[in-house]
Image (cartoon, rainbow, N blue to C red):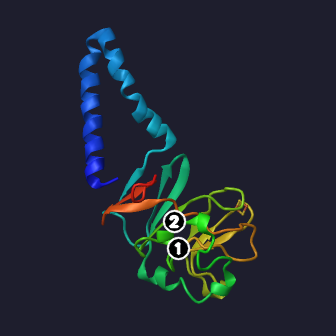
Amino acid sequence: MTDDDLDSNRRHFLTVATVVTGAVGAGMAAIPFLSSLKPSARAQALGAPVEVPLASMQPGEMVRVLWRGKLVFVLRRTEAMLDQLSGYEDQLRDPNSEVVDQQPDYAANATRSVKREYLVVEGSCTHLGCAPIQDFDVRPAEGWGGGFFCPCHGSKFDLAGRVFTGVPAPTNLRVPPHRFVRDDLILIGQDQGVA
Ligand code: FES
């Protein structure tokens, strides 16, 4: 879907909403118009794409959003965080994102991202689905360069959501479909026309 399509959809929604608001005062006359809202409500329930504005997000900051009832993390990585992403590939189960179901093709790269600065992953441990906790402190003595820790059974993921070996989680955190509508706006749940 293009930006023009999105704008067109928004305009359509506003038009329908305006019509319904105007029709409420007419009593029963409102009913046919309310039915025209159903596809939109159904789309919401199924999980319409979610916009995440980035303009005020600082480097090192992470926001959590819900998409299709799933928690999604959006982390703006610092250069220091990005520098941490290499040199321990032998400790990762899938360092090159070869398990194809865990990310779209456009995120099967060294940073698992569209733009290297922004990590977008589902906040669901690939063992049994607990929400991993962010642990971005670097602790060289522990061999920890920052990442995510699952409190349920101890799975660990790096700052690209890649799972370490020796933990119960079998795969990397999943990267949902997403795209940059603008430099300061991510749309989660939709890439180039595929929701
Ligand atoms: S659910 Fe995360 S380690 Fe078990």
Q: Position of residue 41 (x, y in %)?
A: 43, 33
135 lies above or below 138:
above
Q: Residues within 10 Å of mark 1 (few under 14, many from 20)?
A: some
Structural distance between the alpha carbons of marks 1 and 2: 7 Å
Tag 1 near tag 2, CB within 8 Å: yes
Q: Nearer the viewer, residue 172 or 33?
A: 33
- Residue at image position (48%, 44%) is 47
Q: Secondary structure at mark 1?
A: loop
Which disc, if any, is residue 104? 2
7 on left or right of 84: left
Which disc, if any, is residue 108? 1
Which residue of the protein is positioned furthest toward the bottom in this rendering? 87
Q: Nearer the viewer, residue 59 or 85?
A: 85
> Tag 2: residue type?
Pro
Q: Position of residue 168 (x, y in %)?
A: 75, 67
Q: Nearer the viewer, residue 118 or 142?
A: 118
Q: Position of residue 151 (x, y in %)?
A: 69, 62
* Rendered image quadrant of residue 188: bottom left
126 lies above or below 93:
above
Q: Residues within 10 Å of mark 2 (few under 14, many from 20)?
A: some
Q: Position of residue 165 (x, y in %)?
A: 72, 77
- Residue at image position (44%, 60%) is 178
